Amino acid sequence: MDNGTPKRPQRRRLSKANARAIGQVAALKAEGLSNVQIARVLDTSRDSVRRVLALPETQAELVKCRELLKCQVITHVSEILDPAWALAKKAVEEGDTKSFENAMRGLVALEKIGQSVSGESQKVEHTGVVTVEKRSAVEELRLRDHDL
């Protein structure tokens, strides 16, 4: 009996035994999607996603996916680390303070990404007094620019 209201399309059911569903849910969760977003992508309900995520097989697959993503990020960071240092060195040689500052900001960002992915703590505590005898490269560049 049709009362004029459109029928809601049938959503897919994620079977507990469906290895494909487990892999898809784990991969999407590892990429940072919420349960609601995963449900939309897979055209299923949040409860189905929640049930699949609760399975031990899914949790194991999620760990594998996160490790894979971690390796990929670390690989990409290490690939651009040397060129980033080369940019900083070139900026120092050319006396370009702005380029040096930008290169160093990029290097700091790469370091933070690497620490975040590897699970290392980003908090650094110093005790005592830190003394530096040489001027920093930034100070040297600024002094050189000022003299020109």
Image (spheres, rainbow, N blue to C red):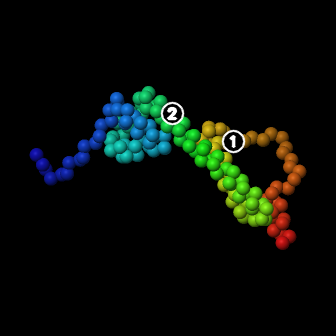
Residue type for callout 1: Lys
Q: Residue furthest bottom?
A: 148
Mark 2, other Cα within 10 Å: few <14 / some 14–19 / many ≥20: some
Would residue 51 appear left or right of 69 to someone viewing this image? left
Q: Residue furthest left?
A: 1
As drawn, the label of residue 123 is 1
As drawn, the label of residue 33 is none
143 or 36: nearer the eye?
143
The residue drawn where x is 87% and y is 53% is 134
Residue mark closest to the camera, 2 vs 1 = 2
Q: Which of marks 2 and 1 is nearer the N terminus?
A: 2
Quadrant for the C terminus, please. bottom right
Mark 1, other Cα within 10 Å: few <14 / some 14–19 / many ≥20: few
* Whether residue 135 is situated above or below residue 68 in the rendered picture: below
Give the x, y percent position of residue 115: 64, 42
The residue drawn where x is 56% and y is 40% is 70
135 or 5: nearer the eye?
135
Q: What element carries label 2?
A: helix
Q: What element carries label 1?
A: loop
As drawn, the label of residue 63 is 2
The residue drawn where x is 13% and y is 50% is 3
